[in-house]
Amino acid sequence: MNEPMHWRVESEAAGTRLDSCLSRLTGLSRAHVQKLIANGCASRNRRVCKPSDKVQEGDLIALTIPQVQELAVEPQNIPLDIRYEDGDVIVVNKPRGMVVHPAPGTPDHTLVNALLYHCRDLSGIGGVLRPGIVHRIDKDTTGLLIVAKNDAAHQALADQIANRTCGRIYWALVEGNVKEYEGQIVTRIGRHPTDRKKMAVLREQEGREAVTHYRVLRRYARETLVECRLETGRTHQIRVHMAHIGHPVIGDATYGYKKQRYALEGQLLHAKELHFIHPATGESVSVQAPLPDDFALLLLKLEAQLPKNTAENDEK
């Protein structure tokens, strides 16, 4: 463990949140600082603290940044569908069924194992089990995920996600006909009060703000293809939000899809587009990934069942 760093809060910082204050002092992203505080690496006046604590002039704040541990995850020769790569960033099209990083019950054959075989220069901010991982998508969700090769890139990309300037666009096939052609879902999402494996829409002052923008791409007889743009990135956000408005994602039994009309191995949710500012060059980068075969084939079948020249089914 490294020696702690100490600061006295000056008058201009008084009244600000501890996580914001430490982020400015260290140059680390606010999300990274929050993780360090949650892991007991920070103190305020030598006492346990929370990210939301308001600092006052004269407060003594301290932060210890753990030493980078030797990576315990084994590289594995697993094929990767790489959609973009340079010296700072990799964008991978993740297949359904692949877990992003090792966890209890899934020690290997994850995206991280595959990335370590592909390249050893990944950022250390994500920790021993999550090198380079800036954000995640669920095991049975397909599509684009961005990975950082160094800490500077990781911090810059994490800041874009936190500041809502990183564009993440998903396609989802959902149950029923969505009435409005476009809309915004704004709730608070947190851990389900009785089922800890699930997330849920919670009451005001609970959970964290979650904002999803959606628009209808195509209506079928019993399903709707929608495009969802994430403004925030809460765990299971799109799955929870679509179920919340009465249109669970096809194949997602966890959040309410019960009519198993199709032979599916997971929900039909695909991270189709990523738009971000390159952390080194400052240029705009846009990456797209095609739908997986089972998703695309089902859309073709549904399209074939539609009446010919039905105007109400034209894409809007």
Image: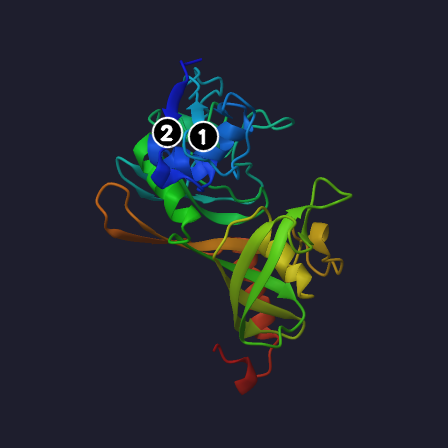
> Residue 119's x, y, as percent?
35, 28
Q: Secondary structure at mark 1?
A: loop
Q: Quadrant of the N terminus?
A: top left
Q: Is residue 273 above or below residue 91?
A: below
Residue 123's label in the rendered image is: 2
Q: Is residue 218 above or below residue 170?
A: below
Q: Do labels 2 and 1 touch, CB within 8 Å?
A: yes
Which residue is pictured at 37% across the width and 54% down the height?
165
Which residue is pictured at 69% across the width and 45% down the height?
198
Q: Nearer the viewer, residue 55 or 179?
A: 55
Could one spot residue 184 in this view of the protein?
yes
Q: Is residue 175 above or below residue 208?
A: below
Q: Amino acid at mark 1?
A: Gly
Which residue is pictured at 33% across the width and 26% down the height?
121
- 314 on left or right of 86: right
Q: Nearer the viewer, residue 270 or 152?
A: 152
> Residue 224's x, y, as percent?
60, 69
Q: Amino acid at mark 2?
A: Ser
Give the residue at the far right of this rendering.
194
Question: Alpha-carbon neighbours of circle 1 within 10 Å: few (<14), some, or many (≥20)?
Answer: some
Q: Is residue 171 above or below residue 86?
A: below
- 42 on left or right of 305: left
Q: According to the image, label 1 marks what residue? A: 126
> Residue 290's x, y, as percent?
43, 56
- 189 on left or right of 257: left
